[in-house]
Amino acid sequence: MCGCRVDGKTNEGGIAMARTEYDYDSNGLARVYENTQWFLLYKSGNQVGERYSYIEEWGEGFYKAEQGIKKNILRPDGSIVLKEWHNDVFKVQKGFFLFSNTIRKSKTNSKTRYTYGVAHVNGDVIFPVIFDRANWLEKGDGIYAEIGAQPYIITLDGSIYDPARDHLPKKVNIDYKDIFEEFAHWVLPGLQFFYRDTDTPVIVDTTYHVGDVLRAGFFVDVTTKLQKPAHKTRFLIASAHTAMMCEIPELCQQNPKVKEWNLCTLHFNSYFKVMDVYEKKGVTQVFLLHIPGAAAFFLGHDETAINFMNEATGQETTLIEMARKSLDEMMKMEVHPRSLDKDFVERMHHPIGLDEEYYPVDSNIQEEPTEGSVAELSKMIHKLANDADLKDFINVEDNYPYRGVEGTVCEGCIYDNGIQGKGEGCGRLFIKSFRERYLKGRCEYRKTDIAKPSFFEEMDQYHKKMEKEKVEKACDTYALNKLKKFVAERLDGDIKKLKDFDFYTLREDTEFGDERVSVVGLESILVKSILTLAFADTYPDFTYESMDKHKYKPDTINITSTIFGINFEDYYKALETYDAPAELCERVARFGKKVHTIGNIMVLPSGLNLMRNTKPLGRGYCDVFLVEFYKMMIGAKKCNMKMLDALNLKKKEVAAFRTEENFNHIVHELMLEDFLDEEGKPKQVFQGLFSWEPGISRDTFIKAANEFLDFCEPFVDKRADRIIEKLEKVLSNNL
């Protein structure tokens, strides 16, 4: 059925009236395109279901619906099959279909991964996206899948695991001796080198790793002969199953360059093992061994098999040694003229194993075309290459003493139908680790009420939440959302009330406090969110996540315990010791409530906050700390070397970090300019009195205490106003 564009009259509901020229399928439906969207249309002229960015027939009367980059299966009545949309869904066969998600390459994921699940058109998810690979068996009577290196056969005859209907799961038994012999026989006879140079700026060391298995993904053109590489990357392919196009007279007649280039082609479903990555004088050679698909799945990570192939040349040198010698010798030659042919360069341009967006090609065998010129080309390459895959080394045997549902952990579970062999529910008896738990009466997937999540679902939700938070914490999203929520719910929408908010009160707060219950509330979610937004440009890589990893830590600027003693419900030991006047006691009590407010909090590289409690760094006096910090930053000979250790950075990073410019930057970003003199250098602000030391007179203490408060009170208020002003701008820019 072809898609049809609506260009006729509409009824009162705005839906296109039926047209006889539409192509209707066996469901009596037509796919219609209108205003950049697709929908299904009855012959009566009524729209079926919702509109999507694309709709396509997808087997057995079902459709694939696309919503942006996400996909789902669409029933003829317009309803979607799966509750969740996925990166891809595959064609329906016998009521089942595969669906997959893509896990893109990232800082925490070295390679792009594809995960697969199995579902039924009735909406049951037979297996969630737990498989690393999955594809239909050749006869369409089951699905081959892998988790890591473990193979599984998912059968669809009556139950997901049990075609004989005897309720016994099956064990996949691989005849490794047989496959190994067939593997060697497939790879070695007729093995020769082929070349493909690319001018694409490939980052080889992060893309191709020795031991990796990759699929071509497209028809790979190669040549039997090149000399010195004209570009920085060369693919050297050792293959015994390459279609020698240059030896076909008819092809050479049609296109003389096929002969001129010694052109050969490998099929898009060809698999390769990365045997070696070798660099020589600015040229990197990626050595690939052409292997059968079955071996890619079963022996892809078997180094014994691969080492055998490497050494089984029949000569004194290994394949890898021969490959390296090839490049060594060719680097002494001139560039071959065909390497400079513009058409040849364009034809060899795309790197092997990468898709159009330069992500790794899906490792699963791609469905081959059955009609058109591409199908003819595919058949011809297979015939010329003689590259049929290995078969008949998989045996399925019973291996598990299943004892039924009654009296087991499965009894009463809403998924027990799957255990009974009806092809519904979990079907997890096929997984060895589950069977072991089943016998012991444990199952994290057990569910007796559809409305209540299982332990697995709870943990899955938790991990998804944590993963989402991790991503959000790496940018400003998490911190921004937390601050917005706090202002709306706790400050009545007025951020200026943040000025006097005591973070000490968040010690046991479940939403904005510290999950570990901080003693003073400085490690609270709210404090870290505020610091992330207010001081984002202070340090390199300073984010909420970096504080979670303890690279940076919040700290109070002015500490009362050093001069006034330990505080317990507005009681300060030193005030009693020195018989402080009532006015001073009241001032101290008022300022004590400001110690853990936003105006008195900064953020330091982890370890420096602990260093501040040592006597050389003033035991909490910020002016002494900044003097010593300045010495360290400018590389003074007599500086506190323990500060270097406290930074907990690599030597190289510390050296780059220690400059007077960076000191000034940090001080200004943290809004600590009041601690600097007119030349921008740290100055003495406080007397540096330690209340517990003997010999301090009452007058000396009272004078020091008043001077401390004379500086700190206006400093904290003024700094709080500056921070709140900055936060207001951040919030207004992110409405």
Image (cartoon, rainbow, N blue to C red):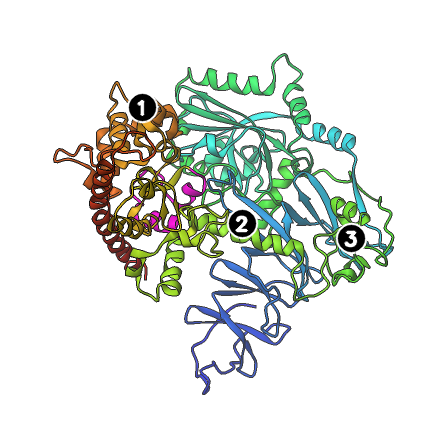
Q: Amino acid at mark 3?
A: Tyr
Q: Is residue 431 above or below residue 393?
A: below
Q: Amino acid at mark 2?
A: Thr
Callout 2 secondary element: strand
The verdict on residue 609 being magenta is no
Q: Amino acid at mark 1?
A: Asn
Instruction: Name the residue beneath numbered marker 3.
Output: 161
Residue 676's x, y, as percent? 18, 36
Q: Residue furthest bottom?
A: 12
Query: Which residues make up the magenta segment?
Result: 526-550
Would you say the residues marked 3 and 2 are in contact, meaning their CB atoms lie under 8 Å apart?
A: no
Question: If you read the primary sequence from the N terminus, does the residue marked by circle 3 or circle 2 appear first?
Answer: 2
Q: Is residue 643 above or below residue 89?
A: above
Q: Nearer the viewer, mark 2 or mark 1?
A: 1
Instruction: Name the residue beneath numbered marker 1.
Output: 640
Would you say the residues marked 2 and 1 are in contact, meaning their CB atoms lie under 8 Å apart?
A: no
The disc at residue 102 is 2
The verdict on residue 541 being magenta is yes
